[in-house]
Amino acid sequence: MSFNLKYRPWTLNDFAGGVSASEVRRLLDSRTPIALIAPYGFGKTSLAILIMAASSCLDPNQENRPCGQCDNCLNLRRHFESNCYGGLDFIKTPATGATTLLDMNLTTKEIIYEWGCLEDRVHLRVVVFDEFQECSYQRIFLKRLEVPGKYTSFVFCIPQDKLHQISEPLLQRMALVELTKPSTSALLPLVKRVTDGEEILVLEPTAPQHLVEVCNNTPRLILNGLEKLKGRSAGLSRDAVDEIIRPMMNAYSLVKKTKPH
């Protein structure tokens, strides 16, 4: 299992994006389509999955949702992890009839996640569209958003540099949530959680901060870097970060510059 999946946050306390539980609950209760906008690796998909989990969490205190411990939270986690192929974040949850999603039989390039739960005998569901800029039927989808769903919430994950690919009428019907770059202090607990869980020896007290900074404060790249260290059986030191992880970051930066927008 990849580190990006193994250490995916399942509570908002573990999420480094600075979004409060009350904000997540407010967005869910409004049934307004949510657009999560951020650069690569900042946690768009992770936050979308947390929103799914919060929608069905059984914790009586709404501020604690998702709790990551109740039956519904654990069921979603098990379902998600058992449906990932080749380390890719791919899942189809047919609890609410994914084959008739949007009442359209269309081929899509984006990844669709869906999760439903029963609340007061009403079937609630959250549908997440990852990489929504790949959607080939935006004009048709616009009609679906004209009437807010009473029991359905939509979440769209859109890379910041691809936002221009989404039509303006669609964006006007969405609540735009921009994820900012996490602070170094917010990401150090993630580094500790992984080094403790994987028994990666921290050889210098300043090495975790150096890792975060070299990875440009990007959670996904930090996890990729730690996974590379684990594969090399290397401890976490400033030299190891410079020798093993910095070349990975340089390659990523080069691909990002040459990739067409």
Image (tube, rainbow, N blue to C red):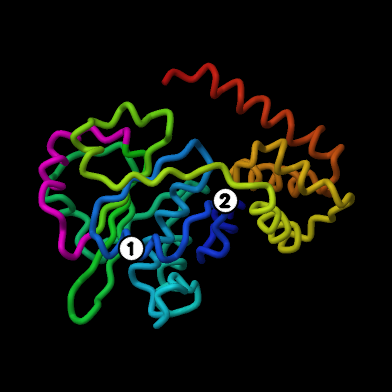
Residue 55 on the magenta span: no
Q: Which residue is mark 1?
A: 26
User: Does residue 133 appear left or right of residue 170 in this picture?
Assistant: right
Residue 65 vertical position relative to residue 258 in the rendered view, above or below: below
Residue 68 vertical position relative to residue 245 in the rendered view, above or below: below
Q: Which residue is mark 2?
A: 4
Give the crowd class for mark 1: few <14, some 14-19, many >=20 residues within 10 Å: few
Residue flagged by tag 1: what amino acid is it? Arg
Q: Is residue 156 visible?
A: no
Residue mark closest to the camera, 1 vs 2: 1
Q: Is residue 41 visible?
A: yes
x and y, in percent, of residue 188 in the image: 70, 54
Numbered label attached to residue 83 = none
x and y, in percent, of residue 77 in the image: 46, 66
Q: Measuring 54% from the left and 58% from the top, which residue is drawn there?
A: 15
Snapshot quadrant of residue 250: top right
